[in-house]
Image (spheres, rainbow, N blue to C red):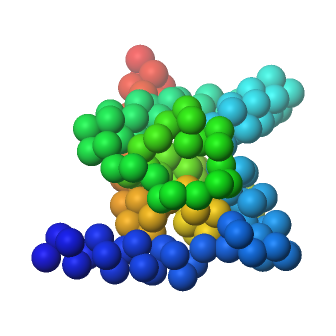
């Protein structure tokens, strides 16, 4: 049964792939595939936290903690499962620094950020991230660095991680406000 599921996953992932096809769809997939990189988010969160108002500073610190915690959880799972990435040419940096694909760290991170944005707002920020997160996940499959199941499970992990980190940070805020 597992062989059939993995075969379906590989076949479906291959049909979504545009990494070898020049054009606008490939350019868009490449953009979204990179937009979920952790270094990009750390830089952006640090800038907004440094230059932003207290309203944004608290959110950026909380999102940064979410990115860190999520990265640790994803790496533990990746090195436990050790599923190889799909074969391909694109994404050498990902292939050389992290040869494991399950779950997708980019999908987990993007859905974690979108979930936290939904819970903390503001609404316009949440809408942008809710639209962006599935585009990142699908772009990782389209560029051939993940199977569909990697991003599907990563998306579920991201929603769970976003909810957990948000719950913990709200708990800390309430505790500090009471003290």
Q: Residue at x 58, y 62 (%)?
A: 144
What is the quadrant of residue 62 in the picture?
top right
Say above or below: 136 vs 45.
Answer: below
Quarter of the image that includes the C terminus: top left
Closest to the observer, 88 or 91: 88
Q: Is residue 104 left or right of residue 106?
A: left
> Residue 83: x and y, percent?
34, 50
> Residue 109: x and y, percent?
53, 47
Closest to the observer, 37 or 170: 37
Quarter of the image that includes the N terminus: bottom left
> Residue 84: x and y, percent?
39, 50
Closest to the observer, 14 or 31: 14
Q: Residue at x 45, y 69 (%)?
A: 148
Q: Residue at x 69, y 67 (%)?
A: 19
- Residue 63 visible at all: no
Q: Is residue 167 left or right of residue 58?
A: left
> Residue 103: x and y, percent?
39, 51
What is the quadrant of residue 63 in the picture?
top right
Say above or below: 34 vs 76.
Answer: below
The residue at the far top in this view is: 179
- Residue 95 visible at all: yes
**Count of picture labels:** 0
Q: Is residue 109 left or right of residue 81?
A: right
């Amino acid at each position: 049964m597992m062989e059939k599921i993995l075969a379906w996953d590989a076949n479906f992932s291959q049909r979504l792939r545009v990494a070898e096809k020049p054009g606008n769809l490939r350019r868009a997939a490449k953009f979204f595939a990179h937009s979920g990189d952790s270094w990009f988010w750390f830089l952006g969160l640090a800038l907004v936290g440094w230059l932003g108002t207290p309203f944004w500073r608290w959110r950026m610190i909380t999102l940064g903690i979410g990115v860190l915690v999520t990265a640790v959880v994803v790496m533990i799972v990746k090195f436990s499962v050790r599923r190889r990435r799909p074969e391909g040419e694109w994404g050498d940096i990902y292939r050389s620094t992290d040869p494991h694909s399950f779950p997708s760290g980019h999908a987990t991170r993007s859905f974690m950020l979108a979930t936290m944005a939904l819970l903390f707002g503001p609404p316009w920020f949440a809408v942008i991230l809710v639209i962006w997160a599935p585009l990142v996940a699908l772009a990782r499959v389209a560029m051939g660095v993940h199977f569909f199941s990697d991003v599907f499970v990563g998306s579920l992990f991201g929603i769970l991680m976003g909810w957990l980190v948000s719950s913990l940070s709200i708990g800390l805020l309430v505790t500090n406000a009471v003290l």
